[in-house]
Amino acid sequence: MTLFDRGDARQLLPYDGEVRYHPDVFAVSEASEHLSALLNETPWESRNIVLFGREVAQPRLACWYGDRPYTYSGLTLEPRVFTPRLRLLCEIASTYAGRSFNTVLANLYRDGRDSMGWHADDERELGCEPVIASLSFGAVRRFRFRHRESREVVEIALEPGSVLVMRGLTQHCWVHELPKTTKVTEPRVNLTFRHIA
Ligand SMILES: O=C(O)CCC(=O)C(=O)O
Ligand SMILES: [Mn+2]
């Protein structure tokens, strides 16, 4: 783990926000151990959402950890208690983000058909300029930001063992998505650590 190289990550957004990408935070063997453990230890839930008046399953599985429920798109995820592994990963995420976290949303993209649509993590309880640290394990997936006004798009490949930190105006001025792809057949686990006041 390269905790001491964490200052020099690349800033991805050209304006109106700050996103830093830290590749290779975890060695290949560490990242694959976290992936298989997270796949097995997490009580993954499938959630239904209403899309154009029809109830359909969200295109991914999820699990929410922290001390209060999480509500988004009209869904409430009941909170679970951090496992020792999540406590460890939370500490690492905090080191890169420079702040502490008390919740994590775990997402499982089973293959390239799973995805997350355009959104911002701008729920009121995250505060006005939230800091969010996103850890990736498993398949490499494309991740895109789109500016709300200029419509400029910035894209990055999120690799296993990486940490992405979003802060400042990022959630105000940009939306982000993890698009579907026909090229990926392997699973990816993502952990987004957040601080809820
Ligand atoms: O899977 C990812 O990398 C992004 C997840 C995300 O944006 C979210 O959980 O809010
Ligand atoms: Mn998000």
Image: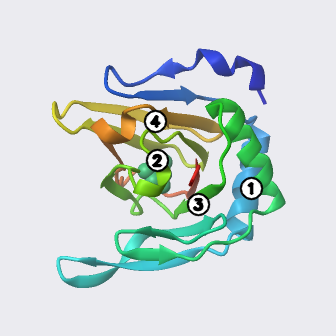
Residue 86 tag number? 1
> Residue tagged by mark 3?
106
Question: Picture coordinates of residue 15 (x, y %)?
Answer: 31, 21
Exactly how many numbered labels are in the figure?
Answer: 4
Residue type marked 2:
Gly
Residue type marked 4:
Ala
Q: Residue at x 52, y 39 (%)?
A: 131
Q: Residues within 10 Å of mark 1 (few under 14, many from 20)?
A: some
In three-dimensional space, the C-alpha distance between marks 3 and 2, rounded to whole angstroms, equals 20 Å
> Residue tagged by mark 2?
127
Question: Picture coordinates of residue 34 (x, y %)?
Answer: 74, 52
Whichever of labels 1 and 4 marks the residue nearer the N terminus, that label is 1
Secondary structure under tag 2 reads loop
Query: Can residue 161 be seen from the camera position used here?
Result: yes
Residue at the farthest top position? 8
Whichever of labels 1 and 3 marks the residue nearer the N terminus, that label is 1
In three-dimensional space, the C-alpha distance between marks 1 and 3, rounded to whole angstroms, equals 10 Å
User: Which quadrant of the structure image shows residue 128?
Assistant: top left
Q: Which marked residue is nearer to the observer: mark 2 or mark 1?
A: 2
